[in-house]
Amino acid sequence: MSSSGFLCILFSYLVGAIPFGILLSRRSGIDIRTQGSGNIGATNVARLLGKKLGILTLLCDVAKGFLPIFCTALLVQQDPSRTLIMALSGAATVLGHMFPVYLRFHGGKGVATALGLFLYLAPWAVALVLLVFLATVRFSGYVSAGSLTAAASMPLWLLMLDGEPWKIALAFFVVVLIWFKHSGNIKRLLNRTEKTWKKNNGTAA
């Protein structure tokens, strides 16, 4: 692998690790890591500080998933290891969000960042994933259930629509990470103690 490939992977991690939820909520005086679900993602920001700031956090987290893979694809077009570099850069971006060096490796759950990553790699699959997410949240009332179900469906959509093995492998890796980071939510869903977004008193996701 070339030095430019290693730099792309490092760049992807460092961009993915930017904690936009914390940066955008700083003016409020609220540390989102100590309130609500304690998560640094858009859902917790929206619950604590309102939908506008939550949407802005969501867009920033999606953008930081999209930007590194976009830049990597441009920079390694002629590299013999292009596919490997692309896969590792994508994984590094999501790992950066989940385990950011800036926050002593305590980060978010990676859903929005993964969305941005695959928005570049497989936009049609992302469209179907979003439908799964919206339908699950609509009928269950749980954002966490929507995130888990939508993430799990990504490898299936890629298999049906794309078929590139490295993208499917990357999707499986990201799904495992997302489910791991949602372990607390899974326990609450199984115990029926997860609070629902419908009643606006949830703490999860």
Image (cartoon, rainbow, N blue to C red):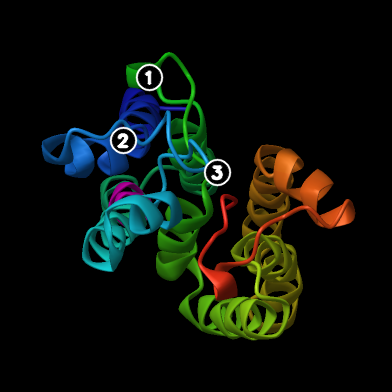
Give 148 or 69, whichever is nearer the viewer.
Answer: 148
Residue at the image point whose x is 65% and y is 39% from the top:
181
Give the left or right position of residue 52, taking residue 93 as reference. left
Give the left or right position of residue 44, taking residue 188 as reference. left
Q: Which residue is mark 1?
A: 103
- Give coordinates of residue 34: x percent, y percent: 43, 28
Q: Which residue is mark 2?
A: 19
Q: Count numbered badges in the picture.
A: 3
Residue that extends furthest to the top in the rendered view of this protein: 104
**Is-magenta flag for residue 65?**
yes
The dot on residue 109 is 3
Asked if disc 1 and disc 3 are in contact, CB closer than 8 Å, the reply is no
Q: CA distance from mark 1 to mark 3?
A: 14 Å
Asked if disc 1 and disc 2 are in contact, CB closer than 8 Å, the reply is yes
Q: Give the magenta range.
A: 64-68
Q: Picture quarter containing residue 19?
A: top left
- Give coordinates of residue 179: x percent, y percent: 73, 47
Amino acid on which the number 3 mark rests in the picture: Lys
Amino acid on which the number 2 mark rests in the picture: Pro
Q: Residues within 10 Å of mark 3 (few under 14, many from 20)?
A: many
Residue at the image point whose x is 31% and y is 30% from the top:
31
